[in-house]
Amino acid sequence: MMVSMKARSPKSLPGADPVACKARIFPRFAWAALLVCAAAGCNQHPDAQFVQNRLRMAANEVPGDIQVQIAEILAAMFGTPNDPFVPPESGLDVDKLRMAAGPVWSDELGIKHGLYRRHCAHCHGITGNGKGPTAAFLNPYPRDYRPGLFKMKSTERAAKPTLDNLRAVLREGIAGTAMPSFKLLPSDEIDVLAEYVKYLSMRGQMEEALVRFWFDEVDAGELIPEIRDVLVDELFAPIASQWEQAYDAVVEPEPAALPGTERSRKELVASINKGRLLFHDAKKGNCMSCHGAGALGDGQVNDYDDWNKVVVEFEDNHQQADLRALDVLPPRTIRPRNLRLGVYRFGRRPLDLFRRIHEGITGTPMPSSKGTLTPEEMWNVVDYVRSLPYEEASRPRHMETSIERVRM
Amino acid sequence: MVSTERVAEIRSALAETASGNSADAEQTAATGTGWATLEGQFLFDQSDSPRPRQPLQITKDAAVCAPGGKAVLNQVMLVDPETRGIANVAVYLRKASRVHETVQPEAETVLFDQEQCIFLTHVMGMVVGQTIEIKNSDPIGHNTNISMSAGAGFNQTIASGDSTDYQPTREESLPAQVLCNVHPWMVAYILPRSNPYFAITQSDGNFRIENLPAGEELEFQVWHELAAGPGHTLVLDTDAAKALKWSRKGRFKLKLDPDETRPLTLEIPADAFQG
Amino acid sequence: MSGKFWAFWLLLVPILGVATMAAGPLYGIWFPRDVSAHGHAIDHLFYFILWLTGIVFVGTQLTLVTFVWKYQAGKRQTVEYTHGSHHLEVVWTILPAAALVFIAIYQMNAWAMEKMDRPPGKPLAEVTGRQFEWRVRYPGQDGELYTPDDIFDVNDLHVPVGEEVLLAVKSADVLHSFFLPNFRLKQDVVPGMKQFVWFTPMETGKFDVVCAELCGWGHYKMKGQITVESRSDFDAWLARRFEEQQATHETAGDEES
């Protein structure tokens, strides 16, 4: 703190008048700063818009006027991100959609609006295309709702998820992925979000149906007929009824084949051993062929799920494709699950694992084994899979050594 | 972006109850009388050579899938060396106003088998209503993954020596891809149609579709798994194709006279295919 | 601009500083409710330091204002040259040092209680911080973690009231910080380090678990909930969660599962 200072009288600096100097520099700087701020203008965001599925348009070589018409039809049938419209046949609740849609704000009562944008859009995108700003950094990518394919559900493979399934995903999140648990949201907000996901999925499916209709039925130079027979009865009604029938497609295991609730240790071990044999049986389910002989998920590492497969096929067919211009993330392979980690994306209950084996996983290479294994055999495999994380081979060795510091 | 007038216009159109417009439109297409036959051959361009057959990457179960260590070649582009005929081209009628009773398939089931890790029928046409019996004649398990449009589809494991039934409920406008995920080099195509007027070219490139409706304009779709058009439709702009009003979606039109057997031999340039 | 002008503005600093601190609690901007047995030790330390530094703060600011008011040089006055005061510098080094040493010793008990005196026994649960959630794992009937009867949950931690709770905390990926505001408990979880936290909840209710170490884009919403309930309720909840986890078929009222 001892500073030696040579005092200088202000008069000693040639031509310097400190007070006058300051008076000139400061206002100049201040005016310059004000001018820059004024030129920057107020922060005006353009309204959020749905984006079209450019990859599908490019793959089908849809001409520009049809693309415009499809955007117009979708706007008429589904509205905008701020102002949703509900086709009467969809069974959607427009009040819930209004709570989810639009910008994020809270009213005087503290009720939150714009829930989808608040919680979901930064990963799943405004259009529900799985390409929000955060999506590129996530592995696996967030779900693209537009094909109407969902992995996490309790229904048959080709069926849609029930609203309960969507709500369960929102509540529990998906272990092992970036999808968080929204358990702490009130249940009415979860209902609203599930409804909006369904709305975005229906909209995406309608877009796909319109492109397919154009490809199949519309002659060159003509437009898609904008009549109820086509747009609603032929194209939208099957989509709406698929969603409606989801509850009828829930997979319930046969009661007769259920494993008992109070099984002795011996029975459990016998079941696990049977499951192990079935897992490695190359003639039947051939589980180890993809999941690996060690169940580490290393048996088949270069396959794609349906969402990434369309991108790969497009790249194969169009060698010079610029994926970023088409608003598409670089395709990734899908690996079979490493069953030794004890991380289950769809729920860890025996029932959940049974459903995976019974129906497979929609949109992925995981097949259904319902033609190959009996329900008892499936429960054996479930027991085996559930025992895998606790096998000696599954314990990471480093937990035994002092590499992991135990503090205090 | 989208104008509010157009949105209002479409919404009011949708609010109108069924007007019967489309029903009228279908009836305006004139139907003829009598039946005719279309037969022909798809030939690969004389002046060029087709893509050579690459060996498949047999990454597992080599004892079954590549016995004796022999390389297995892919079936993506099969051109007969003598005739230059292209195999596995699908030619089919898009809409049939009427169907001759002899052309309706008698068999309720069609067999779709796989052996030595190859689907035995590379491109298979069938009629909606028939059942596909998917068979596994290998000593190891396979899964058969069929991707139909709009999320419909099928993916089940088939045990060795076993078979499973699958019945498509809708026709497809283009053949659906069939894969095995356990053995990812396995690929085939299935085409369910609502009318029986389809043909898949043989190894010499020949095809024949009998008893087609005569006296009316018929539109055919042409497809090949390596074609460069959208959805692998075969898009041609040769003079012969232009005479048939060949469209950018791989479709051509013609009108057959009753009892006619129309020959249709087309030379396909190499650039109609990818790669 | 004379010294008196600036002195007035400088006087606002201690006035506003004290006023906002005093007014905060009236607007709900103060501590969250403390429901733990030993949280008061942290609060006490906070108030002690607040008062000590507050008095010094007001004193130094008033001194500054006084000097600026009294000793402002007029325009075009020659500067007075001084070497400073060695005596003053010694004083204002020794006194703060002594105060800091005092504080360091004064808080040692609180630190030991919170961070060093780990209660014996096995942890009630293991909490793993993961981008961007808190994964909870209870040992189940056998009392051992990493056995087949473990019970899993996410963002939902239950503990019994009135008992000392020991939790093992770890990170699955990056730095997080396990922060229970209502228990005055915070522990950074470092990847590769296995740590323990302990506290004794005194009231039932639902409280926040938040992350207090920037861990990525989702850090702001990495929130969980800790439910304090009676021992019997806790045991019942745990048993119910175990049963749900073993389900082989849907039962009526499975809406929440």
Image (cartoon, coloured by chain):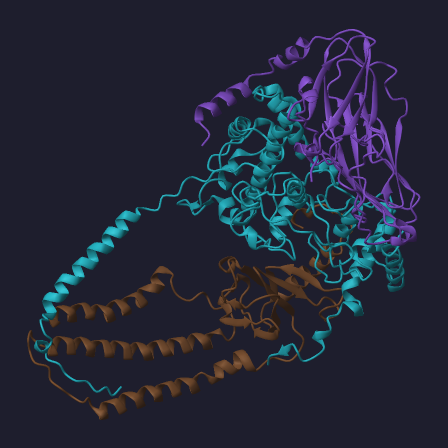
Chain colours: A cyan, B purple, C brown
In the image, C244 versus A19, the foreground residue is A19
The answer to whether residue A356 shows anywhere in this view is yes
Looking at the picture, how far across and down is residue B93, in whole percent? 75, 20
Picture layout, residue A290 above or below residue A311: below
Looking at the picture, how far across and down is residue C74, in whole percent? 7, 75
In the image, A85 versus B179, the foreground residue is B179
Query: In percent of the image, x 65 and y 51: which residue is there?
Result: A332
Q: State the quadrant of the N terminus of chain A.
A: bottom left
Work out which residue is located at the far bottom of the displayed protein and give it.
Answer: C87
Looking at the picture, how far across and down is residue A338, in whole percent? 74, 59
Q: Is residue A170 left or right of residue C144?
A: left
Q: Is residue A305 left or right of residue A27?
A: right
Question: Residue A345's quadrant in the figure?
Answer: bottom right
Q: Is residue C85 left or right of residue A169?
A: left
Work out which residue is located at the far front of the displayed protein and give it.
Answer: B47
Question: Residue B78's quadrant in the figure?
Answer: top right
Q: Is residue C40 left or right of residue C90?
A: right
Work out which residue is located at the far top of the displayed protein and give it.
Answer: B33
Looking at the picture, how far across and down is residue C154, in whole percent? 62, 59
Q: State the quadrant of the C terminus of chain A.
A: bottom right
The answer to whether residue A91 shows anywhere in this view is no
In the image, A233 versus A270, the foreground residue is A233
In the image, B252 versus A254, the foreground residue is B252
Query: In percent of the image, x 53 and y 71: which residue is there?
Result: C188
Q: How many marks?
A: 0
Picture layout, residue B201 above or below residue B56: above
Question: Residue C79's quadrant in the figure?
Answer: bottom left
